[in-house]
Image (cartoon, rainbow, N blue to C red):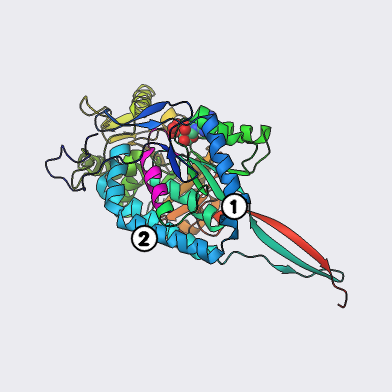
Amino acid sequence: LGTAASALEEPIAPPVQVKHTQLLIDGQFVNAASGKTFPTFDPRTGDVIANVAEGDAPDVNRAVKAARKAFDVGPWPKMTAYERSCIMLRFADLLEKHNDEIAALETWDNGKPYEQASLVEVPMAVRLFRYYAGWADKIHGLTVPADGPYHVQTLHEPIGVAGQIIPWNFPLLMFAWKVGPALACGNSIVLKSAEQTPLTALYAAKLFHEAGLPPGVLNIVSGFGPTAGAAIARHMDIDKVAFTGSTETGKAVLELASKSNLKPVTLELGGKSPFIVCEDADVDQAVELAHFALFFNQGQCCCAGSRTFVHESIHDEFVEKAKARCLSRVVGDPFRKGVEQGPQIDQEQFNKILRYIKAGKESGAKLVTGGDQIGTKGFYIMPTIFSEVQDDMAIATDEIFGPVQSIIKFKTLDEVIKRANASRYGLAAGVFTQNIETANTLTRALRVGTVWVNCFDIFDAGIPFGGYKMSGTGREKGIYSLQNYLQVKAVVTPLKNP
Ligand code: ADP
């Protein structure tokens, strides 16, 4: 195994090696039952970083058995909420201690700029675990007034074994969004990482055991979707599934859950979020924010502001300035200082993005800048802008998941509301205006799970996130995520002497 930062002229990350490649089941690193492994690649070069154990249905079964035992027998359910909270806090401390090493591993496996991984993603995961550690001992039911001589109470109990399937765009943060609330509520977990980015989940889960998590509470099965992922979705002994990924796969997961044991499913799916720049906007600020909203994380965000609606009165100036901003965007080795954009995750996504760029050109949109790959090694794509985009073009309707901004002109507020809402997705929206009336009108009219006004991608642990329409069901983060991992039990007792 090489070291991630070894080829750098100016290394800004610590050298990091891959320590864990096996499945983590019942507190032990083990090989897959089949003995199979799969390669995980460095998006900068396409080279293999490591071969990782490839979990499949028998491994998921093994993990579910361990999770079941940990949940049904113990010691996990016998621990107090405060003890669970302390373990989560100790884990957060360990994550923080290893911040730079985990960030380097993330960059190596995913291609995102190291500066963003180390300054944003890992610290956000730490913050999230501390947030949910705070909730662990504050989860409780109610006493309910009854119409007769009864004492009525509700118990908020953990739902049981949670199956969790996560994507590759924010591997550690998605791990945190899933694992944090599930453990705070006292569940046990079988988690499948994305096949493109299996490394940080294994590293983090190992640290969780060092923090005192009992064996079997958190099991990690690396592997592919149709095998290991589907085995989780249809498992008869898994009580709940949480999924983040594409809308298409979300449908498959929901179908498997309904065909098996009707486990409740929460889904965080795709998006095509409008970013609406109103006529009163400061153009320079709007350009910068719209640029961030789309290009952050190589454009690989489910909530990316990928339909940039710009009022006609400032449109031409906006397009010129957006082009200049794209041309100044620093694309390159994500381990280098100052790099804003690294490679896309893999060959498949790279090809898909280039296909959309081609479709954009062919559909008559105007290519303002970019429009091609960069170099021949790795999965780098030029920051790309199309203007004169029409609502029915594929680049305006489909989730591209890459650095391709579609600028769309509008005239009136009513019109932009209708057009922004005319999408099968409803994940998020950005609104850029200095007029409070305009902001209020838009925030109420947009059918989306998050509206960022004069900001974008603000992801505090307490802010709920999730979609309307085909962007998903349920909310993650904040108090809302706890509901996903709890059952409510009503207990009714007669009062003899009311
Ligand atoms: P993408 O196309 O961006 O890779 P996916 O929705 O396919 O997004 O992947 C998100 C997660 O879902 C990954 O962990 C992947 O392995 C998993 N997955 C893919 N197909 C299935 C499936 N049929 N059942 C369960 N999980 C799946």
- Give the mark nearer the N terminus: 2 vs 1: 2
Q: Would you identify the image quadrant in which residue 379 lies?
A: top left
Magenta stretch, main secondary structure, is helix
Residue 21 in the image: state x and y as whole percent. 37, 36
Specify the segment rendered in magenta: 193-208
Residue 166 in the image: state x and y as whole percent. 47, 40
The residue furthest top is 362
Q: Is residue 335 magenta?
A: no
Circle 1 Cα neighbour tier, 10 Å, few/some/many (<14 / 14–19 / ≥20): many
The correct choice, above or below, for 336 with respect to 158 in the image is above
Q: Amino acid at mark 2?
A: Asp
Write down the residue under mark 2: 93
The correct choice, above or below, for 412 with respect to 405 in the image is below
Residue 480 in the image: state x and y as whole percent. 56, 56
Q: How far, Cα to Cα, is label 2 from label 1?
A: 24 Å
In-front residue for pair 333/261: 261
In-front residue for pair 255/56: 56
State which quarter of the image contains the N terminus.
top left
Q: Amino acid at mark 1?
A: Tyr
Task: Describe residue 288's horizontal placement relative to residue 391 as left or right.
Answer: left
Dot 1 beta carbon under 8 Å from ligand 1: no
Write down the residue under mark 1: 485
| Secondary structure under the numbered disc 1 in the rendered image | loop
State which quarter of the image contains the C terminus.
bottom right
Asked whether residue 5 is in view, the answer is: yes
Q: Is residue 206 magenta?
A: yes
Residue 14 in the image: state x and y as whole percent. 21, 48
In-front residue for pair 252/248: 252
Residues at badges 2 and 1 in contact (C-beta under 8 Å)?
no
Residue at image point 40% right, 27% down: 37
The correct choice, above or below, for 180 with respect to 419 in the image is below
The residue furthest left is 9
